[in-house]
Amino acid sequence: MKAGIVFVTTFGVPAAAHFGYIFFRLGDSFFRRVAEGNPAPYFTYKRPFLSAFYHLGELFQMSALVPLLLAAAGLLLFSIQRGGWKRRAPILLLWLPSLINIMALYWGLVYRLRYSVLLLPAVAIFGSLVITSARGKRSALLILLIAVSVLPGLSWFVSRAAQSDTLAPGPGAILLPLAALVLFMLARAKDLYEWALLGLCILGLQLPPLARENRPILVETLEHGFIEPERHEVMQYLQQNYDGKRILIDMGKLAPLVYDSGLPVKEFVYNEGGETSWYRALKNPEQEVGWLCAQKGDAVAQQLQVDPRWAAGYSLALKTDYFSVYRLRR
């Protein structure tokens, strides 16, 4: 009981003070935005099971399948071993980011794969719990062997029958099952289950059996690489022509452009953390900003589309396939 009170105090009081201060200063908070949802919601909106399943897919991509299966085995062992449950209960808090991810998906917000990196400690620690039990080690290694051995056939079946690349084979589709079999036989012969599990996890990270877990965060990071030339064109134009007047920009879409432009962040009016100036600019842009920077589909582009007269005092300074830059005429 005392431990619970101490935890609530040390965690709850600073959190309440932090979010209370933000709400007092801005009249807004992360929790209110999540509760409101998204005006153009993601397909997981108000679908709890789909949200959980989608997050599970992100988790498997982020941590790789083999370590995640080992963590699942550790979680199962954790629930079975009643004796040490109270002592180990606090480590369940490591899974809290999963609840936040699922909530965000449920309310229609896109939650990027890289955000799930916060769950790496949970995967690592719960995976390590398996080695605390002799039976758990043997069972986990057998389960991993079966899983990686079945995946090549499952990948082939899904690609042929369903015409889907969801389970497309990765670089370790053939080599990993063979390595898992060798490690399993060595573990059985020498009773080295801990090292066999560790070796299989490392191989599963370096030679993933499925394509979707092959450097997925790097793939996500580079997904907008096709517009990089246009982004550099916008930054070069701003650097050469910027006149000291502030720039209205959607920080949710164009944060990299803001930071890479070389201009001080205070020169931008944006919609994350500076809502007061942002809403004033949306109501009367000519009084607040000298520039409008829009990317196709972002908040500024949507405002331009909804009300073309909104930017009547600006002239189009630069236009590319995905970007538009407007400059105040006077």
Image (cartoon, rainbow, N blue to C red):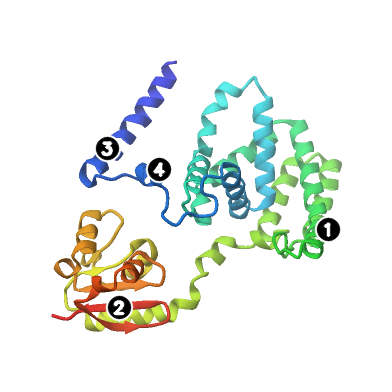
* Foreground disc of the pair 2, 3: 2
Mark 1 element type: helix
The three-letter amino acid code for the residue at tag 2 is: Val
Mark 2 element type: strand
Q: Are marks 4 and 2 in contact (CB under 8 Å)?
A: no
The three-letter amino acid code for the residue at tag 1 is: Gly
Which is nearer the N-term, disc 1 or disc 4?
A: 4
Which is nearer the N-term, disc 1 or disc 3?
A: 3
Q: Which residue is mark 4?
A: 35
Name the image quarter holding the C terminus.
Answer: bottom left
Residue 120 coordinates in the image, percent (x, y):
55, 47
Q: Which residue is mark 2?
A: 325
Which is nearer the N-term, disc 2 or disc 3?
A: 3
User: Label 1: few (<14), some or many (≥20) within 10 Å?
Assistant: few
Q: CA distance from mark 3 to mark 4?
A: 17 Å
Q: CA distance from mark 1 to mark 3?
A: 54 Å
Q: Is residue 302 found left or right of 141 in the rendered image?
A: left
User: Label 4: few (<14), some or many (≥20) within 10 Å?
Assistant: few
Q: Is residue 7 visible?
A: yes
* Foreground disc of the pair 1, 2: 2
Image quadrant where residue 310 sits: bottom left
Q: Which residue is mark 1?
A: 153
Which is nearer the N-term, disc 4 or disc 2?
A: 4
